[in-house]
Image (cartoon, rainbow, N blue to C red):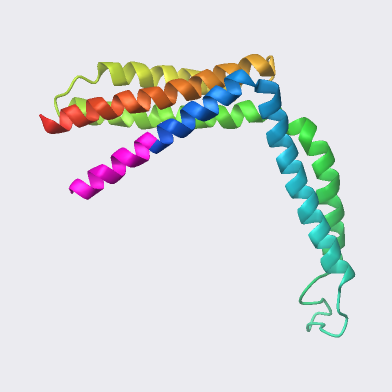
Amino acid sequence: MRGLLTKFKTEVIFRAIILIVAGGLLFAFPNAAQQTVANVIAVVLVILGIIRIINYVKLDKSHSSVNGMNEYASPSDLVIGILLIVLAGVCAAILVNFIPVVLGLVVLASGLIKLDSAFTVRSSGGNATPIFVMAAISIVVGLFGIFHPSAVNNIIIRIIGGGLIFAGISDLISLGFTKSAGSE
């Protein structure tokens, strides 16, 4: 049981550090963060497209299956490869608008986890009010990021960055309350 609690504590601390660092980067560099994520996804799509096209070009006609299609590559690989490359060009511009939604989901999930922790602390007789407040703030900030991504992206990214920082710090505080409630 002790090993399980240590593992739980380590996971919460690790998650909190990641949330705080990610939130700090988003808060300090909102444009760069959005563009970097969009560019990485675009590069991955281009690489996948090139791999599909190479598979088609290297098509070995001697290894046909029963239905006449090659078991290693098909003409659909060429089409999918081209579509992936085109999608990469369009994706970078469109994806920037979805980043606040994804980050909002992360903050919302953190808030829901805190809400669950608050109910656990309350059922064990501890003071869960601070955890409920932190959970509510995380949930509201997460929902804001999800339902208002078309607002000014820099503001949303900074709010979400602040939400990630808050989520990480409040995870650490919640861990303290959970630990004290478990020792009573």
Name which residue lies at 87% across and 53% down: 82
- Give the quarter of the figure containing the C terminus: top left
* Lateral position of residue 176 relative to residue 16, left or right: left
The residue at 86%/79% (across/down) is 60
- In the image, taking residue 96 as reference, residue 166 lies left or right, namely left
How far from the left and from the top, in percent, is residue 67?
80, 80
State whether residue 72 is above or below residue 147: below
Q: Is residue 5 visible?
A: yes
**Residue placed at 68% from the left, 19% from the top?**
153
- Does the magenta segment cover residue 23? no
Question: Main structural element of the magenta stretch: helix, strand or loop?
Answer: helix
The residue at the point 43 percent across, 25 percent down is 167
Comparing 164 with 60, the one in front is 164
Left or right for 132, reference 56: left
Judge whether 76 appears above or below 108 on screen.
below
Q: Decide if residue 80 is in sight here.
A: no
Which range is magenta? 1-13
Residue 11 located within the stretch drawn in magenta: yes
52 vs 72: above or below: above
Can you give x and y, in whole percent of width and height, for residue 27 in the image? Answer: 58, 19
